[in-house]
Amino acid sequence: MGLNGIDISSWQDDLVVGNMATCDFVIVKATGGAGYSNECFRRHANDTLAAGKLLGCYHYARDRGYEGSAEAEADHFIDAFKPYVGKAIPFLDWEADALNLGVAWAKAWLDRVKAKTGVTPGIYTSKSVLFSCDWAAVAKAYPLWVAQYPNYEETGFLSEPWTDGWDFGAWDSPLIFQYTGTGRIFGYGGHLDLDLFYGTRDDWRRLCAVAGASAGTKEEADIVTISRANVAAQIMEHLCTCSLHGYSQPGRHGTSGHCSVKTDAGTVKVTKGDRDCSSAVCEAWELALAGSPYDGLITRYNWTGGMREMFVGSGLFSWKPMSFDAQRGDIYLDEENHTAMCIRNDSTADLLGEFSISETGGIDGEPGDQTGRESWVHDYYSGSWDGVLHYNGKADVGGAPGGSGSGAPSGDVSELAERVIAGEFGNGDARREALGSRYDEVQAEVNRILLGGGSGIDVDAMARRVIAGEFGNGDERKRRLGSNYDAVQRRVNEILLGAGSSSTSMDVDAMARAVIRGDYGNGEERRRRLGSYYSIVQARVNEMLS
């Protein structure tokens, strides 16, 4: 027995991870060669973590047209993998043109990724390759993800997939076994690679872990932790010091073309042209969070009066009085008029980065900074600030978002519970990680709110929350609904099967989506639970998946 999973690339750009109810883990292609980047990588990786599933990331060696040295290809992968250090297992995909490079090339890539991230990567290849070279040096240090297909017939997840024998060359056994490229599972209409992980969720998490510092070389200690506050400050400092950027409200999101900014999280591209005070600060943080599980919570498309709500509402910032000692990346805010970012904090004074006024003295500016003061870095000044938006470090690589101690979210338990219900902290393991040491008290309050606190529940409202996926499936749903399970589940069935509704087609669609989500199991279990509705619902499921 083990865990079921899939591996995907840009070929599955339309796949929605949240729909893959029966899937325990997802391994996503990040990069190839020394220059290819999967445009779907961040979305799929972030969705995997948000859905509470286990994550892996892989690099396709010697991707045609992007070939490079082992070191160059490793660095290209590391740049993409940085936001997921400590949260995912990295892999080297060794097939096709890479097979001509030799074992030494593969080991050089694996060694470099391990040295620079602190995470031990694995290697993926087909079983036949295991006997074509001497893999002993690799097998001693790195686990195996192996592929072997008995045929190309369609199949679902298998707990004991076929193999021609349990001889895996230099490896005693594989970590992961890929047994088909023509898999079919509920939640996606096309073929998928299906994989079996020989271990538990805890085993997977241990393989994601960053090793402790050893000899202390730069190679060993590199990029284990990335401060998103530093990245935001680095981007803001560029915006404020590069002459290509000036102040304008009408043109507050730049013009055309890009500048490249080197940051702790890699090279970031920013649009050339003008900003106003709020779009500059918001953009710096938007780009700083890109690639993290919190990607998209902050957007540049905001205004000064809406910043406090957006930043605090993200769960990544808290509102502090002016007596608070602002840190790098924190934001000074006058909610009616102006905002600036703390670029540096030291013993003398804060340095602020800000966009203030155009070269004309009004709001209309020409692209670029013509005065040297439209966008600039300077000493802190005592303005009409209302307070400070302080970053809590949750999105930093190497730490546990929302973990114990200072990483746990602050605020009243009732407020946090309402934010959980609104979907801000995700579900399952993602919620547990985000809430950290406050998980038990907040989840208890969530349960009390949703279950009516002993005063009786709104069964209809509860049923619709179940249909929306808030309470999971199977035993998890039973556990979370407790004594209310029978009444709520009965109403769920009534809603999905169209009881009392005149819109049969809509109800069949809803029921089909519930089947695809995994609510009604498979095979005979599904047939039993759907009863007389089985044929019509299953026909609609087949239509949706085709």
Image (cartoon, rainbow, N blue to C red):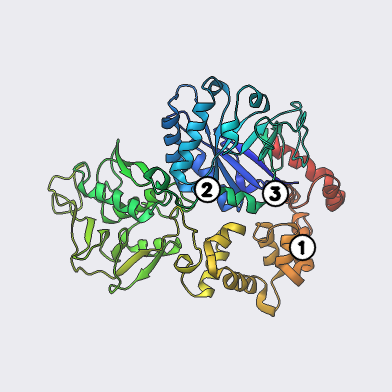
Q: Earlier in the sequence, mark 1 or mark 2?
A: 2
Q: Check the picture and name the quadrant holding the C terminus.
A: top right
- Which residue is drawn at the image coordinates 26% and 49% (left, top)? 275
| Front residue of this view, candidates 145 and 102 | 102
What residue would you read off at disc 3? 517
Label 2: which secondary element: helix
- The amino acid sitting under disc 1 is Gln
Q: Are marks 2 and 3 in contact (CB under 8 Å)?
A: no
Q: Is residue 289 above or below residue 105?
A: below
Q: Earlier in the sequence, mark 1 or mark 3?
A: 1
| Front residue of this view, candidates 34 and 132 | 132
The residue mark sitting in front, 1 or 2, is 2
Q: Earlier in the sequence, mark 2 or mark 3?
A: 2
Task: Confirm whether residue 520 shows in the render.
Answer: yes
What residue would you read off at disc 2? 46
Pinpoint residue 407: horizontal percent, then vertical percent.
Answer: 46, 65
What residue would you read off at disc 1? 489
Q: Residues within 10 Å of mark 2 (few under 14, many from 20)?
A: some
Pinpoint residue 461: horizontal percent, then vertical percent.
Answer: 67, 66
| Label 1 – label 2 distance at C-alpha | 31 Å
- The amino acid sitting under disc 3 is Arg
